[in-house]
């Protein structure tokens, strides 16, 4: 009996000694916050971190609009201020400008009163409501996991109608869960479902562009391998879908580049998480992969620039060569010691739809290594002038051209 | 070139005056003594301002705070946030359990708390100081993030706390409460 007890004791001690460390190591390492995922151990002490969103908009006197530089003949003015975290802009049929936000949780209606603008909050407390689109009297709003609509909103700005659910079979992941939302030439609602991480093998349901019919039926994936696209538009002539994508972080100062792509047909794969910028295999998820198996970008827009809005110019105010050029709003970098972006770039396409020229259109939000604003989306006005939303200053600028 | 009008700087004196209704729970200088009520002294300006916005907009709900938040203007929030950021945080008397503190220290490492809350968990910008915060409040807010009722700004906390057990929450709270609160910035 004693012998058995001793033997058991020895076995028990041996087990503890043998598996003790494993038991401890079994406590799984928790993933760091999304923004820190993929950071190499050598950069563990890096001071780089996302730029904090101010809790309130800047007062007009705090917005140095004269620092924004545009090409000769163009002028920039502060058009509206006091719009906390102003992001996507979309026009109502009756001339209301609807403006989204992200972390502020609001949707705004901005009314042009000639010399001034009136701002009304029409929805608040929403879950990262970045996407807004308008069609046939109805405003559509995309939050993280649902698309809703406000029917007849322009007649009820002071007493907004209930938000009716259009589509809510969507992932609830918050990282890269906010959406851009736009109607395509086919009348369908397009949006992104971002990767729920900086870099990972995303679930099959993530890292894509998707679409539904305006009534919420007919969900389908449009593009795969898209880390997070929060800006897209259709070429005015070819009607092809052009989209911007934020590339992964922590892979160096100058790589990988953010990108501009064309989804020339449904179902293409754009490389994430295996291949970045069309020609760099991911050090972890690129093993055994080949960049030539994925669609390559038509333009590398720059490392960490945070390309958000894209809009093709179709107005009549700017010089004729501006027709069908694309404005790319770049909110600016955080994962780079030398800041880059914080500007609106302009893309001139060649006859085949490729990129002939890529140049700055509006810049100056970055002064040295200090920023005072972050241009995030553009929207043309009826007269052909261009609005630029700044979510950091909570402001909208208007760019005009005088012949 | 238009001369920029002077910006309306947040007003400490106005913040002090506007903090009158807050004193009953949060203390005269933002150092609370009621268990379950957070100290707001020395919290970063962005943090306090964002919390007040969330109470006003209903994203964060609390029987006491929701009515106060409902009537605040943007200027009120800026003044209050500036006032409380300028107050010196003092430790909250809490019976922290050494074994829970030790377990919480390990958990804070595993869950990367310092990535955002900074070494010493002193907070910065929109991210709060946790060091020396009230023990009961820390438990309550961590449970709130897990239940997704605490009103996360961007999803980071909701994502971070999902793997935590009830015991983990308790241990983390003991650890955070045991740390010395930082100086006001």
Image (cartoon, grey):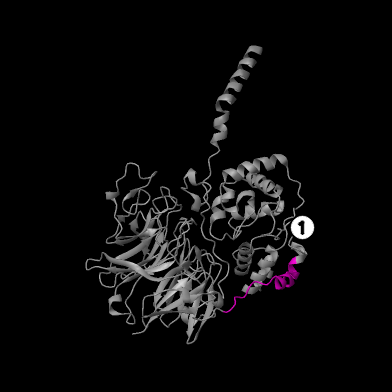
Task: Assign the N terminus of chain A to one quadrant of the image.
Answer: top right
As drawn, is A357 to the left or to the right of B78? left
Q: Nearer the viewer, residue A263 or A74?
A: A74
- Judge from the rendering whether residue A284 lies leftward or rightward of residue B131; answer left or right: left
Farthest residue, direction bottom: A114
- Is residue A26 placed above or below A136 in the rendered structure? above
Outermost residue, left side = A351
Residue named by callout 1? B34
Q: In the rendering, at what x and y percent does residue B43 appear?
A: 66, 60
The quadrant holding residue A75 is: bottom left
Q: Quadrant of the C terminus of chain A?
A: bottom left
Residue B90, given in percent of the width and then of the height, sits at 75, 55
Residue A4 sits in quarter: top right
Magenta stretch in the rendered image: B5-22
- Residue A226 magenta-highlighted: no
Can residue B39 be seen here? The reply is yes
Of the pair A299 and A286, the residue shown nearer to us? A299
**Left or right: A10, with A181 as reference point:** right
**What residue lies at 35% left-to-right and 53% top-to-bottom?**
A225
Residue B116 position (above or below residue A87): above
Asked which secondary structure carries label 1, the reply is loop
- Residue A208, how many percent across, how many down? 37, 57
Any part of residue A219 in sight: no
Q: Nearer the viewer, residue A148 or A101?
A: A101
Q: Which residue corresponds to the image point at 64% horizontal and 61% vertical from the top-left?
A: B44
Does residue B98 sit above or below A242 in this rendering?
A: above
Is residue B6 rendered magenta in the image?
yes
Parent chain of label 1 = B
| Residue A209 appears left or right of A145 | left
Tell me what residue is drawn at x 26 percent, y 72 percent: A237
Q: How many C-alpha atoms fall within 10 Å of the one at disc 1: few (<14), some, or many (≥20)? A: some
Question: Residue B142: where, in percent of width, then height?
Answer: 63, 52
């Amino acid at each position: 009996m004693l012998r058995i007890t001793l033997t058991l004791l020895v076995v028990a001690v041996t087990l503890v000694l043998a598996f003790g460390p494993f038991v401890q190591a079994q406590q799984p390492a928790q993933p760091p916050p999304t923004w820190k995922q993929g950071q190499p151990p050598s950069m563990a002490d890096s001071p780089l971190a996302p730029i904090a969103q101010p809790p309130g908009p800047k007062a007009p006197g705090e917005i140095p609009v004269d620092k924004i530089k545009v090409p000769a003949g163009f002028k920039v003015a502060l058009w509206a201020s006091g719009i906390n975290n102003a992001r996507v802009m979309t026009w109502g049929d009756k001339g209301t400008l609807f403006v989204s936000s992200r972390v502020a949780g609001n949707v705004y209606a901005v009314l042009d009163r000639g010399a001034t603008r009136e701002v009304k909050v029409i929805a608040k407390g929403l879950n990262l409501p970045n996407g807004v689109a308008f069609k046939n009297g109805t405003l559509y709003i995309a939050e993280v996991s649902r698309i809703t609509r406000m029917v007849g909103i322009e007649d009820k700005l002071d007493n907004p109608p209930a938000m009716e659910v259009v589509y809510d079979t969507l992932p609830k992941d918050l990282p890269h869960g906010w959406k851009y939302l736009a109607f395509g030439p086919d009348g369908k609602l397009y949006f992104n479902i971002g990767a729920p991480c900086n870099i990972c093998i995303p679930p099959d349901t993530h890292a894509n562009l998707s679409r539904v019919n305006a009534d919420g039926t007919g969900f389908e994936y449009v593009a795969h391998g898209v880390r997070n696209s929060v800006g897209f538009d259709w070429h005015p002539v070819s009607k092809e879908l052009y989209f911007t994508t934020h590339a992964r972080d922590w892979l160096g100062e100058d790589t990988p580049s953010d990108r501009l792509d064309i989804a020339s047909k449904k179902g293409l794969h754009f490389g994430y998480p295996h291949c970045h910028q069309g020609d760099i295999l991911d050090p972890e998820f690129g093993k055994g992969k080949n960049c030539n198996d994925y669609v390559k970008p038509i333009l590398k827009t720059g490392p960490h620039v945070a390309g958000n809005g894209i809009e093709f110019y179709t107005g009549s105010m700017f010089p004729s060569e501006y027709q069908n050029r694309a404005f790319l709003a770049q909110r600016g970098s955080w994962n780079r010691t030398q800041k880059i972006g914080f500007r609106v770039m302009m893309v001139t396409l060649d006859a085949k739809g490729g990129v002939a020229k890529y140049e700055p259109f509006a810049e100056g939000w970055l002064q040295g290594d200090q920023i005072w604003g972050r241009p995030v989306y553009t929207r043309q006005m009826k007269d052909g002038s261009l609005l630029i939303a700044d979510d950091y200053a909570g402001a909208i600028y208007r760019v005009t051209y005088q012949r | 070139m238009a001369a920029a009008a002077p910006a309306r700087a947040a007003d400490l004196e106005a913040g002090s005056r506007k903090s009158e209704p807050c004193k009953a729970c949060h203390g005269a200088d933002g150092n609370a003594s009621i268990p379950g009520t957070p100290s707001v002294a020395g919290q970063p300006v962005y943090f306090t301002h964002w919390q007040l916005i969330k109470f006003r907009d209903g994203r964060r709900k609390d029987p006491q705070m929701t009515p106060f938040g409902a009537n605040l203007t943007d200027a009120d929030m800026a003044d209050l946030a500036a006032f409380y950021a300028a107050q010196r945080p003092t430790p909250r008397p809490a019976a922290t359990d050494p074994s829970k503190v030790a377990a919480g220290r390990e958990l804070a490492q595993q869950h990367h708390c310092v990535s955002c809350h900074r070494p010493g968990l002193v907070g910065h910008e929109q991210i709060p100081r946790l060091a020396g915060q009230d023990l009961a409040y820390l438990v309550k807010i961590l449970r709130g993030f897990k239940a997704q009722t605490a009103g996360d700004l961007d999803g980071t906390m909701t994502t971070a706390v999902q793997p935590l057990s009830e015991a983990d929450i308790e241990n983390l709270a003991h650890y955070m409460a045991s740390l010395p609160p930082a100086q006001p910035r």
